[in-house]
Amino acid sequence: MTLTQLSTFVLVARLGSVKAAATALGVSEPAVSQALASLRQQLGDQLVTRAGASMRLTAAGTRLLPIASQMVALGADAEAAVRAGKGAPSQLRVVASGAVMEFVANPLVTAFAEGRSERIDATVGMAAADEMPVLLANRFADAALGPNLMPRPDDEMVSEPVFRTHLVVVAGAGVLPGNPKGWSWLVDQTGTEPSSDSGRLLRRLHVPESRIRVFPNQTAAWAAAAEGTGVAIAPSHLVTGRLRRGELRVVNTACTPTEATWYLTTLSPERRSTAAETFRHYLSTATALRVMREPGAGVPPSKFRPPVYVTLWS
């Protein structure tokens, strides 16, 4: 039994599919299936089985899940203790999604790490909003930037507002026929997530799924909107240059412009890493606010890859 196998089981159980676990781990689906098969063979139980489009825990799997989650968390604590004992830099793993990932997260975390007197090994990766609580709770990530993950109080983690902006609808120079429900809406891969700002706005405007086109990233969606393919949703401060150059124009709707807030989510204070706490304080500084307001041209998002733990049991 290894921490890698237990981590795989926890993610399959929490995220509900082998594919989602593979994406979160940054490995192939066969690799996830193989790790799960080895754990099943050693423990003599299926642990988790397919039930339609999701996964269902067996009785033994239900008992194992909280124990496995605790062992994975202890593995992360052990790694942090060894790093500290060797004098290695503190580790900060940040996950983000959507425009925050594409434009803000990398320059923000880079500015944070470069501005510290002590060395911090900081990494940034992409994760879907519904994956973020799982990654945080099981210590695959230290902090998440983007949507509010905890609309109600939670004992395990805390979401705090760090930046306020406005969402606007943008389009090219052409005339838009009809009403918003009939327009072609161009979004990035997170645009239809229920907890994303774009997803909530599309629901408020009653846009049918058939009118939504998904692009690889926000930049591609905005470029298509500028060419007259449809309309796109944008944080207003991230399209200022495109508006000034006349590439895009703001189209007012019954629901926009509307306020939008970016949040930092971390574990509760008693479980939060020192690096995560330091990053949390940094986000309230003038430097951090300036980076979030004017992050630059943006960078292509990359898949989040948690650390692969060494084998502790054979």
Image (cartoon, helix red, strand yellow):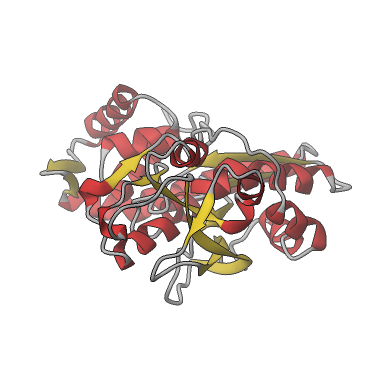
Question: Front-most of 12 and 220?
Answer: 220
Determine the image quadrant of residue 314: top left
Residue beneath the point at 16% across and 53% down:
59
Q: Residue at x 59, y 48 (%)?
A: 77
Quarter of the picture containing the N terminus is: top left
Q: How many numbered circles are shown?
A: 0
From the viewer's perspective, tell me whether residue 237 is left or right of residue 217.
Answer: right
- Relative vertical location of residue 80 with respect to residue 146 in this rendering, above or below: above
- Name the outermost residue toward the bottom: 153
Q: Is residue 65 visible?
A: yes
Measured as percent of width and height from the top left, residue 300 is found at 56, 32
Q: Residue furthest left?
A: 52
Residue at the outermost front position: 175
Please tell me which residue lies in front, 32 or 151.
Answer: 151
State whether residue 97 appears in this view. Answer: no
In-front residue for pair 223/248: 248
